[in-house]
Amino acid sequence: MKLIEVKNLEKVYQSGESKTVALDGVSFLVDKGEFIAIMGPSGSGKSTLLQLLGFLDRQTGGSYKFDGKSIEEYSEPELARIRNEKIGFVFQAFNLLARSSVYENVRLPLFYSNVPETAWDSKIKSAIDAVGISHRIVHEPGELSGGEKQRVAIARSFVLDPEMILADEPTGNLDSKNGEMIIKLLDELNRKTGRTIILITHEESLAKYARRLIRMKDGKVESDIRI
């Protein structure tokens, strides 16, 4: 089943008389359950594309359908709900609350969901256990290693059982060993749960874990191959 349909997607940033074309006619389909890596040099448009796919920004041209429905058909409250419940985000900078425990960080998306509070504890502990960090559940980010912080971020990203996880350079602040551990964890989540994962990375050694590789250049899709 199709989760994403992108056709002739464009994103242009305007600043006075100056225009910057970040995306220029990008088209592709994503089936549910795929694990896709997006690669390209700095300025190729890959991070802009991820922002559009995650409803963090709007395109200036072309169309984007999520779950068979055009983004224009969703109201702002609906988009906010989808961002929280159907899409999980993992960023290079972790984006954890500094003075909150692992448990509290993973709990955060539940505050903005319709999940009954009686079910929160089991969902939180299940997500934390899935990333192998139960022994750090009461610790704050300042007490964790970089790899552990990213594991917390991944647990938070899927605590609501989203359909898709968007990971923007999730290993950028990690050494090679921890970076590979994080990608293996995402790979395992994809294989075991069928969650769609779209990963941005500049490292060929990590992209090999995906089953499809999209390369971008100058705001366009340069190649799109199954691995």
Image (cartoon, rainbow, N blue to C red):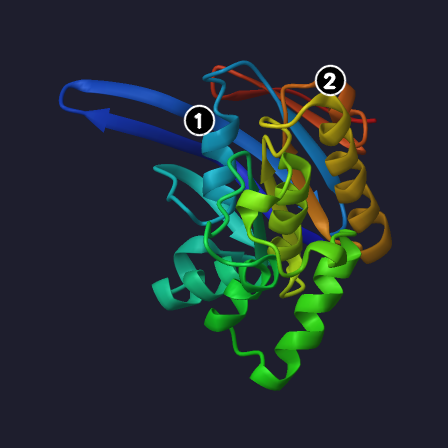
SS category of the residue bearing label 2: helix
Packing grade of label 2 (10 A; few <14, some 14-19, many >=20) is few
Q: Is 220 positioned to the left or the right of 119 in the image?
A: left
Residue 13 visible in the picture: yes
Question: Where is residue 113 shown, x and y percent of the image?
Answer: 51, 73
Question: Where is residue 177 shown, x and y percent of the image?
Answer: 77, 26
Q: Amino acid at mark 2?
A: Glu
Residue that carries the numbered disc 2 in the rendered image: 204
Which residue is pictured at 79% across the width and 52% down the height?
Answer: 132
How far is the residue under mark 2 from the one under mark 1? Answer: 23 Å
Q: Please state which of the two labelled residues, at mark 2 or mark 1, is closer to the viewer.
A: 2
Which residue is pictured at 25% across the width and 20% down the height?
Answer: 19
Question: Where is residue 119 shown, x and y percent of the image?
Answer: 65, 81
Residue that carries the numbered disc 1 in the rendered image: 23
The quadrant of the picture occupied by the N terminus is: bottom right
Pick the front one: 171 or 20 = 171
Q: Amino acid at mark 1?
A: Leu
